[in-house]
């Protein structure tokens, strides 16, 4: 498939900021990360409720001794809320437990990461199975669904 990117600007960005006021829940201690299947994108990472999780190419991927770091705060985090948890969540079938960690955010929260990538929701994904954030270009990077191997999924 060819690379298709969508840009979030203007009215769409304002709508996302308004929707962000509703907020998204943090993972409960007994929740797991899991894998869902999509006809368009194959297997991708979700929370226990089937809500898609994304990585952000502007983030620093933690690897080779370098810690992961989020580049998404303020207005960015309103549109792309970080997945936060008090403890490192468990993983379901088809995921590697050793790829899950938490990352310190500058706001004091613990953000869940997978394969060194901090994970995020997208406020326009309102139901399980929604993947409207895939390939969106905004806030200085591109947002991708995450494969079970921890790689960005291309369009």
Image (spheres, rainbow, N blue to C red):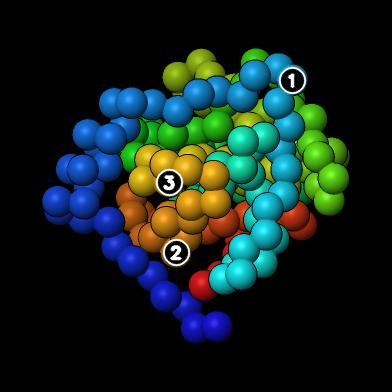
Apparent side of residue 41 relative to residue 90 in the rendered image (left or right): left
Q: Are marks 1 and 2 in contact (CB under 8 Å)?
A: no
N-terminal-most mark, 1 or 2: 1
Question: Against 95, is 86 above or below?
Answer: above
* Residue that label 3 marks: 125
- Determine the CA span between mark 1 and mark 3: 23 Å
* Residue that label 2 marks: 135
- Badge 2 crowding class, 10 Å Cα cut-off, few under 14, some 14 to 19, many 20 or more, is many
Label number found at residue 127: none
* Residue that label 1 marks: 30
Residue placed furthest toward the left: 11
N-terminal-most mark, 1 or 3: 1
- Badge 3 crowding class, 10 Å Cα cut-off, few under 14, some 14 to 19, many 20 or more, is some
Mark 3 lies on a secondary structure that is: loop
Q: Nearer the viewer, residue 64 or 136?
A: 136
Q: Nearer the viewer, residue 75 or 40?
A: 40
């Amino acid at each position: 498939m060819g690379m298709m990117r969508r840009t979030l600007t203007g009215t769409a960005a304002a709508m996302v900021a308004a929707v962000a006021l509703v907020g998204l829940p943090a993972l409960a201690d007994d929740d797991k990360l899991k894998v869902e299947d999509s006809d368009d994108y194959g297997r991708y990472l979700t929370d226990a409720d089937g809500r898609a999780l994304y990585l952000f190419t502007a983030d620093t991927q933690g690897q080779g001794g370098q810690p992961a770091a989020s580049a998404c705060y303020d207005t960015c985090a309103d549109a792309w809320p970080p997945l936060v948890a008090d403890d490192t969540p468990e993983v379901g079938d088809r995921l590697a437990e050793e790829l899950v960690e938490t990352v310190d955010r500058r706001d004091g929260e613990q953000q869940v990461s997978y394969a060194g990538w901090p994970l995020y929701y997208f406020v326009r994904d309102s139901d399980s199975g929604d993947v409207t954030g895939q390939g969106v270009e905004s806030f200085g990077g591109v947002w991708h669904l995450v494969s079970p191997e921890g790689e960005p999924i291309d369009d």
